[in-house]
Image (cartoon, grey):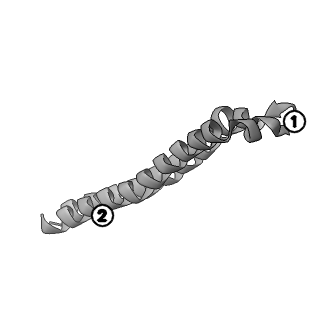
C-alpha cells in the first residue's frame, strides 16, 4: 500500500503542476484583456479583435490539448496503480 500512496502523491503533484499554471494562464489572459483593453481591441486578426481570439477562440484548443495530454499521463499513472495492486 505504501507504493500506491506514492503513486497517488505523484498524481496530486502532477495535477498541481499542470493545473496551477493553466489557471494562472487563463486568469492572465483575462487580466491582459481587461487591463490593456484599448491596445488589445485595436489589434485585429482575420476580422476579429484580438480579445475575441484570446478569450473566446484560442482558449478552447489550448484547453483541449492540455486536457488530452493530461488524461493520457493520468491514465498511465492509473495503470501503474493497477499493476501494483495486481502484483501484490
**Dot in front, 2 or 1:** 1
Q: Is residue 42 visible?
A: yes
**Residue 46: which disc?**
1
Q: Is residue 21 left or right of residue 61?
A: left
Element at badge 1? loop
Q: Is residue 83 visible?
A: no
> Counting other residues with Cα less than 10 Å from the Cα at mark 2, is it few (<14), some (14-19), or many (20 or more)?
some
- Image point (87%, 35%), residue name: 46
Instruction: Give the image location of residue 84, x and y in percent.
Output: 23, 65
Q: Is residue 52 left or right of residue 60?
A: right
State which quadrant residue 55 falls in.
Answer: top right
- Image point (76%, 41%), residue name: 39
The tag earlier along the polypeptide, 2 or 1, is: 2
- Image point (51%, 46%), residue name: 67
Instruction: Give the image location of residue 38, x and y in percent.
Output: 74, 36
Element at badge 2? helix
State which quadrant residue 4 falls in.
Answer: bottom left
Instruction: Name above or below for residue 44 compared with residue 85.
Output: above
- Image point (41%, 60%), residue name: 17
Depth order, front residue of 23/33: 33
CA distance separating discs 2 and 1: 43 Å
Quarter in which the C terminus is drawn: bottom left
Quickly name the residue at label 2: 10
Amino acid at each position: 500500500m505504501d507504493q500506491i500512496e506514492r503513486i497517488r502523491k505523484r498524481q496530486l503533484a502532477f495535477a498541481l503542476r499542470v493545473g496551477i499554471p493553466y489557471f494562472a494562464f487563463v486568469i492572465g489572459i483575462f487580466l491582459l484583456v481587461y487591463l490593456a483593453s484599448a491596445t488589445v481591441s485595436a489589434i485585429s486578426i482575420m476580422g476579429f479583435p484580438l480579445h475575441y481570439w484570446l478569450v473566446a477562440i484560442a482558449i478552447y484548443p489550448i484547453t483541449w490539448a492540455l486536457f488530452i495530454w493530461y488524461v493520457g499521463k493520468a491514465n498511465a499513472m492509473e495503470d501503474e496503480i493497477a499493476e501494483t495492486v495486481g502484483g501484490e
